Amino acid sequence: MKTILTGIRSNSEITLGNYLGALLPMVRLANKYSKEYNINIFVPDLHSIISEVDGNLAANTIRSLKYYLASDLELNDNVHIYRQSFVPAHSELCWILDCVATMGETSRMIQYKEKSKGQDSCNVGIFNYPILMAADILLYDAEFIPIGEDQFQHIELTRNLAIRFNNKFGEIFTVPAKTKDQVKFMGSDEGIRVRDLLNPEKKMSKSTPAENSKIMMNDAPEKAAKKIMSATTDSFGKIKFDMWSQPGISNLMLIESLVNDVPLAEVCNEWNGGTRYGDLKKKVAGSVSQLLTDFHAKLEDVTDEQIFELLEKGESYANKVANAKLLEAQKAFGLR
Ligand code: AQP
């Protein structure tokens, strides 16, 4: 059986961008395909420590797994939930892939450039994490990896490493689908990028210091609504979905479409040409606060015990699959 795989770091509370760009698409794909695909949902806790950890990492990890259940993930024997650091093969394969990847290609990663910008001395993990991400994917022969647009370059890097490895040693890794096919599989025309509310040129990120720039999934619904009402727009005076010239207003339309799971074209039909930015903001604020109200209510019903039970099964499965693949790679390099 083929595999669909995703992970969201738990260095802090997640944003609406993480939720709409990665978590929700994964839940929708899982519920659609879990009879024909393995669904691997893991928390990349080793990736989490490349950034400052806000709160207790182990507790954040359990909480972020609860988010999947609170988003109506349907469970069955093909849905596997695990923590990256509980499957040591991830770090082992990362080292092997480090010896396949080049400094040139890894240095070109935009996320590395962005995450290291302005830091006097950035940790090596920030540079190396795309290789660990490749290991996360290749250990399970994952074909589809629902992620936001910011991570597409890392999928291309993973594909290149798998192809290079296979060319040298034989068909050991499944090469993940090309990003354009990933997007198609997720049922859209392009990757999702939810923008920063105050500076819509940028993506919404957990680590952006300004509180009003991002909606956190634990924000009170009224607080989130206020953040939407104070989002930066423009002075054109006419609503038009155009991420280049009107990114602020377009971002709100994108959020409206994703939160309500309606096609963007439908939202554009309703709002394009209008002049009342305030009405659009009120509509989006209402949609987001309703989403959070429902989400928080569902979250209350998910227990730690449920998650630990899933982790026990999931980590046993993940170790079995990952160790078998690691052994193939070790043999290829002559380590075994
Ligand atoms: N703004 C976004 N829009 C759509 N998708 C997004 N993702 C992140 N931001 C957006 C997707 O969320 C998944 C998990 O991301 P991550 O937490 O592992 O790392 P990240 O991309 O570094 O997320 P942040 O929020 O920007 O964190 P910080 O600020 O700590 O660096 C990925 O699939 C990503 O595409």
Image (cartoon, helix red, strand yellow):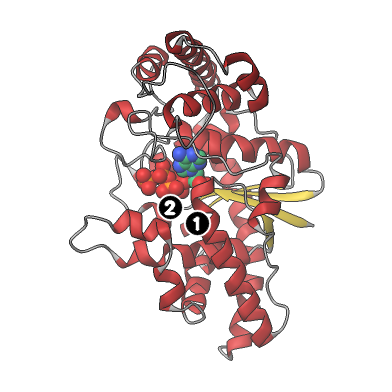
Measured along the vertical axis of the image, is residue 144 above or below residue 76? Answer: below
Left or right: residue 153 versus residue 11 is right
Q: Position of residue 81 (x, y in %)?
A: 60, 47
**Circle 1 sits on which residue?**
84
Q: Position of residue 89 (x, y in %)?
A: 54, 68
Residue 8, visible in the rendered structure: no
- What amino acid type is highlighted by mark number 2? Asp
Which quarter of the rendered image does ligand 1 occupy? Answer: top left
Q: Position of residue 333 (x, y in %)?
A: 58, 88
Q: Which residue occupies the foreground of this view, 61 or 120?
A: 120
Dots 2, 1 in contact, CB < 8 A: yes
Q: Residue at x 56, y 38 (%)?
A: 23
Q: Quadrant of residue 232?
A: top left
Measured along the vertical axis of the image, is residue 196 above or below residue 158? Answer: above
Classify mark 1: helix, strand or loop. helix
Left or right: residue 189 versus residue 218 is right
**Circle 2 sits on which residue?**
45
The single residue placed furthest to the bottom in the displayed view is 334
Classify mark 2: helix, strand or loop. helix
Report, in whole angstroms, how far the alpha carbon at label 2 lies from the one at label 1: 6 Å
Whether the residue under disc 2 has CB within 8 Å of ligand 1: no
- What amino acid type is highlighted by mark number 1? Gln
Q: Earlier in the sequence, mark 2 or mark 1?
A: 2
Measured along the vertical axis of the image, is residue 164 above or below residue 151? Answer: below
Q: Which residue occupies the foreground of this view, 151 or 46?
A: 151
Q: Quadrant of residue 79?
A: top right
Picture quarter with the N terminus: bottom right
Q: Which residue occupies the foreground of this view, 234 or 300?
A: 234
Left or right: residue 107 versus residue 240 is left
Measured along the vertical axis of the image, is residue 187 above or below residue 335? Answer: above
